[in-house]
Image (cartoon, rainbow, N blue to C red):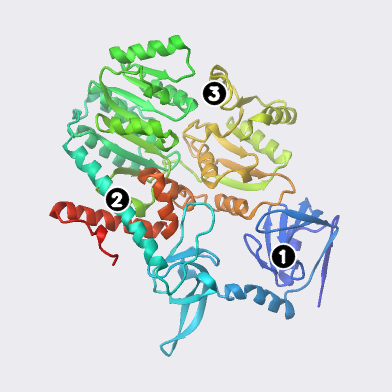
Amino acid sequence: MRIRHLKTGDKITLDGLEAMLQELRYVRKGLVELPGEYAMRGGTVDIYPVTYRMPVRLDFRGDTLHQIRDFSPSEGKSFTMFEEVFLIPLSGQFEKKVRRLEERLGAFEPVSEAGELQRGDFVVHLHYGIGRFLGTKMIRMDGAKERCYAIEYADGEILYLSLKEPLERYIGGLSGSPKLTKLNTKEWERIKERTRIALHKVAGELLEIQARRSVQQGFAFPSDRDWQQKFEAEFPFEETAGQKRAIEETKRDMEAPKPMDRLLCGDVGYGKTEVAMRAAFKAVTGGKQVAFLVPTTILAEQHYILMKDRVKTFPVTVELLSRFQTAAGQKAVVRSLKTGATDIVIGTHRLLSKDIEFRELGLVVIDEEQRFGVRHKEAFKRMRSQVDVLTLTATPIPRTLHMALLGVRDMSVIDTPPRHRMPVRTFVMEYHENIVKQAVEREIARKGQVYFIHNRVENIEKVHQKLKELMPGVRFGVAHGQMPVEMLERVMMSFIKGSVDCLISTNIIESGIDIPNVNTLIVNRADCFGLADLYQLRGRVGRFREPRQAYAYFLTPKNWVLTLDAGKRLAAIERFVELGSGFRIAMEDLEIRGAGNLLGHEQSGFIHAVGFDLYCKMLKRAVEEQRTSARSGTPSTEQRSPA
């Protein structure tokens, strides 16, 4: 038996190390979980030696083995530093040891037919409930051998199901694992029944709102005039198919005699703002005022600059209103809204204050409604019965939910990327000053700009000083939400105009900031961000007007052992780089958030109980049943037992 020995200070290339591990019959994985596995990322190699209690992490500097330490794969904690590590081939008795460890997972094989299912994933079966996917196994059924799914349920019971059985990956939304269903009990039926009753209530409310709106009288805007065509012709890009469809649907709603209440969904950077601007311009030329509500001052500022620029060749007045303006400035804007002198006002929740009165409000645009508070949402509800409302969200609404709400909620989805958009090249690696220096200098050399995200206000200035010392020729700016607004405005304007090369910022730039010249993003301590946040941040780059490669660096501290969850998040952001992957990346996170935003956050408990896919199917059925009972005048099936 050939034992391999590695010690700190040894020189070995990563290719050489991989060849050695393969000779020892170790298996390469994305993350190590069992003895005999290894994973490679940058200059870091994780190995689970077959004779060790825990995996070890090898850190390299160039081709030199710099450090060896063990770590817990579930918690990410590092316990012991080692001078050396011994690697024994995976054979004979050690394969038996791995098999014993796998026995709980049944030594089942992975299967391509299961789509994206991986061993250990939670799954949902309509009749049996929530289980853990173990893989597949050949089982003799009805005298013939057949490959079956192997699903572990409560108390370690394993159920074998034909590959033809409808099995969905469990997506639950709340933190923590779901409870495995107990087989041969009524537990699963009781959970489904509770969910079904709650869904009938949701469906009933949605249909009631829709019925009320259909009899309300709103303002029917006239069809497009010459100015509208001229305004739209000034758009510097070519509209995507998704944008065109959303624009047509929005205009059709505005020209109808009932109040519009349309939700516009689109991945980050897919052109929702332009749809909103065309709707705003249509409202103004139809003789009405427009309120554009955004969740942050920085976003209000940016939409204001953009809107002013878009209407500069037309006699349209655009104003900005936020609580950070001077009292005199605010008073002047409030007065102009009352007299009708302002056509379009862009602002934060300051626009919902009691002193705000419009002379002729006709359209309200709400950007990312879920980021406003409960009190503000009540105000939005009142608006919806009086004026046209267009709500924008970058939170993807999954197709299953969209289908369930067809005919109940007016929704437009922009699902086509802009023409020159390229996927952002994404790197997950440990923090090294050289990486940061090279990334910043390469971007500046092509006359571009950089976002450096550091999400801790208390030491952001320290980071600024370090980066200044590292790159004295670079013009830096600092932005965070605790700065005086005039200062924040100055920094942002300097960055937008190109007189700042690199903006060191907290994640206040996460929502909606659109500066096409910024095509490198560096995120410090990326392990502390949620998957949705990382995805939104990456959406800030890659918006250049011609094809230009954008880069995103998600950095973690040197010699830091990531928790299993953080490791999975970073592996996901690195894996999902294709355009529009927001509709996949966020299965765990964004879609659930999207469902909560649409249907009310109390629904998240039911989503967690039965899984997202089954929840959507049950919602679709509840809507159909409520609609049928409303038409026929018979009571809904809420009191009947589930089929």
- 15 or 143, which is in the foreground? 143
Asked if residue 34 shows in the view, the reply is: yes
Relative placement, left or right, of 309 versus 532 is: left
Sequence-first disc among 1 and 2: 1
Label 2 sits on residue: 201
Q: Amino acid at mark 1?
A: Tyr
Label 1 vs label 2, nearer the camera: 2
Pick out the residue farthest to the left: 632
Q: Amino acid at mark 2?
A: Lys
Give residue 392's position: percent from left, percent from top: 37, 36
Image position, residue 536 (x, y; %): 50, 41
Considering only order in the chain, which callout, 1 or 3, is on the residue closer to the N terminus? 1
Mark 3: few, some, or many residues within 10 Å (few <14, many ≥20)?
Answer: many
Total numbered circles = 3
The residue lying at 63 percent from left, 73 percent from top is: 102
Q: Which residue is mark 3?
A: 492
Q: Is residue 316 left or right of residue 287?
A: right
CA distance for labels 1 and 2 = 51 Å
Q: Residue at x 28, y 56 (%)?
A: 622
N-term-proximal mark, 3 vs 2: 2
The answer for how far apart the CA atoms under marks 3 and 2 are is 46 Å
Residue that numbered label 1 is attached to: 48
Whether 613 is drawn above or below 463: the answer is: below
Considering the numbered disc 1 on the image, is that residue within a helix, a strand or a loop?
loop
| Mark 3–mark 1 distance (CA, rounded to whole Å) | 48 Å
